[in-house]
Image: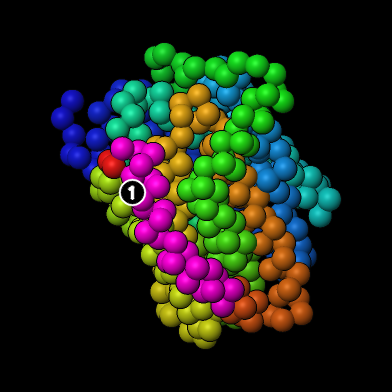
Amino acid sequence: MNVPLGIRALAHRNFRIYFAGQAVSILGSWIQQVALSWLVYRLTGSAALLGVTAFCALIPQLLVGPLAGAWIDKQDKKKCLIGVQSLLAIQAFVLAALTWFDLIGTGFIVLMSLMLGILNSFDTPLRQSLIGSFVGRREDLPNALALNAMLFNSGRFIGPPLAGLLLGLTSEAFCFALNGFSFLALIGGLLVVRGTPPPRASGSMGQVFKEGVLYAWQTWVVRMLIMTLIALNLTASAYAVLLPVFARDVFGGDATTLGWLWGAAGCGAFASTLFLATRHSVPGLITSVAAGTAISAVSLLLFAAASALPLALLGMVGLGFGISVCNVGINMILQSVAPEQLRGRIVSFFTSARFGFDALGGLLAGFVAVGLGAGHTLLLEGCILSVFVAYLFSLRRRLVTQVENSHGGR
């Protein structure tokens, strides 16, 4: 099958099937995320609770994720992913039922968010580590990862405005139920995928986990890239928790305004994956990651200082682009340089840093905003990230050289 170079991974049948199922599932997940944040703020009006809810949905990735990666590398990944997707569907349906019958409260919301976080601790590394087996050819893996991120960001672009529309016409419960049904698309796709499963790691859980930790710590470029993930997601990604505050209190809007803010970030993120899908040099991604971190810092400062919605939307586009270039670019580099037998563990370390510190940053931002206000909180985080950007650029040449050595210069 002849396909353009920018979407060359779609030449593989298994990846096309996975890609179609994933598209539906991701759209449903974004609709639920926006509906849940609006439900929390509508019921409580608390920026702190927004931070707590986001924290509970993400922190298991930091605590459970690394161990989940060791467990995943010892299992049949496809069967495990089908099981986790089924549990995620059940979680969404339970959330819909509780909301529909007015049984939802702060305790239930926190519990449902925590359950979602635990399931995602297994779901994310499972999906990421399986992509290599769906494309078959190692040289097509970076493109497959970029296309997978493009799906995520397309959902981020389409899902929030759609969620805002659905919330105006229906209810949060309808959005949660819609997400539950969306998981069936990926489950169906996984059931018809055929191919050789990835190799399993041997040894005890302790041995497998230790092997992954030693590789990540002793490989300097891996260690530095994970540090970059931590710095970015502890600061720039925290904007997401405070968006309902900006939508209602700063710009005087409603759920539709929130959807537009989310959608602007999704637009930037989608553009970033179009950019990354055309990258052919893995070492060259280092420069993209450094530039993406810098764009994130500048855009965060712009959004925090904006008093008019159009300027804020511009800042959100920049944030979506910069954060996505950095996160997706690092994922592409890590999976390209990591040995096949370690991929599940390296992906779990990536998701742990990506989402775990996103959770910590969101929790911190929610509580700091109570005292400083949402705008001043993001201004402070933008300044902190700017300092890290200067440090990262000072290391760029060394990072490029090490990635060239580990990836054969491709």
Left or right, residue 339 beside residue 356: left
Q: Where 190 sits versus 52, above or below?
A: above
Q: Quadrant of residue 326?
A: bottom left
Q: Residue at x 42, y 37 (%)?
A: 337
* Amino acid type of the residue tagged 1 in the rendering: Pro
Which residue ends up furthest to the left in the rendered image?
2
x then y, percent, for residue 324: 44, 56
Whole-percent x, y for residue 310 in the image: 42, 79
Asked whether 36 falls inside the magenta stretch, the response is: no
As rendered, which of 137 and 341 lies closer to the eye? 341
Q: How is the image coloured?
A: rainbow
For the stretch drawn in magenta, the main secondary structure is helix
Give the secondary structure at mark 1: loop
Residue on which the image places disc 1: 283
Q: Number of numbered discs present?
A: 1
Q: Is residue 18 left or right of residue 25?
A: left
How far across and down, in percent of the image, does residue 165 sit? 50, 58
Residue at image point 53% right, 29% down: 342
Placement of the C terminus among the 4 image quadrants: top left
Q: Residue at x 60, y 16 (%)?
A: 202
Residue 395 visible in the current orientation? yes
Whether 403 is among the magenta residues is yes
* Looking at the image, residue 205 lies above or below residue 173: above
Up-down relation of residue 371 to residue 257 (above or below)? below
Examine the rendering and report whether any part of residue 18 can be seen: no
Q: Is residue 74 left or right of residue 101?
A: left
* Residue at point 84%, 50% (across, down): 107
Numbered range of the magenta stretch: 382-408
